[in-house]
Image (cartoon, grey):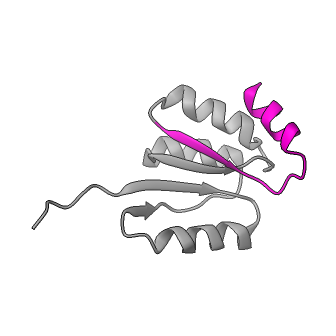
Amino acid sequence: MSAPTERIRVLVADDEVLIRGAVEALLALEEDLEVLPGVSDGIAAVAAAQEHRPDVCLLDLEMPGLDGVEATRRIVEAHPETRVLAITTVLSLAYSVTQVRG
């Protein structure tokens, strides 16, 4: 019998309740993931990352308070070990990439 592995802790931040809920529900199906309580804006994402110390954050690029780009900068600055993935419905990939790269 193999030793249990640590679960990957995931934080989802999206102001669209249905999108956030759907992503959380899909992630929760994976045994090796622990889905942390989701949040609806960038300010809450930064606070939740500080409180819960997720391994991975899935952040919407367009959120109230702080957008996903600025929330990413703040999270990674405070917790460089945290990985961040952008999720978005923005139609322009070039815009999204430019914003993330700064």
**Looking at the image, which is closer to me, 38 or 58?**
58
**Looking at the image, which is closer to me, 65 or 100?**
100
Residue 20 sits in which quadrant?
bottom right
Q: Is residue 16 left or right of residue 10?
A: right
Measured from the top left, where is residue 29 in percent x and y? 46, 75
Measured from the top left, where is residue 82 in percent x and y? 48, 38
Measured from the top left, where is residue 36 in percent x and y? 48, 60
* Residue 86: in magenta span: yes
Residue at image point 41% right, 62% down: 34
Measured from the top left, where is residue 63 in percent x and y? 78, 50
Residue at image point 79% right, 36% down: 97
Q: Is residue 63 above or below residue 76?
A: below
**Looking at the image, which is closer to me, 53 or 47?**
53
Residue 95 sits in which quadrant?
top right
Query: Which quadrant, please, contains the C terminus?
Result: top right
Query: Which quadrant, please, contains the N terminus?
Result: bottom left
Residue at image point 63% right, 49% down: 44
Which residues make up the magenta segment? 82-102
Q: Residue furthest left?
A: 1
Residue at image point 90% right, 46% down: 92
Q: Is residue 82 left or right of residue 94?
A: left
Q: Is residue 98 above or below residue 54?
A: above
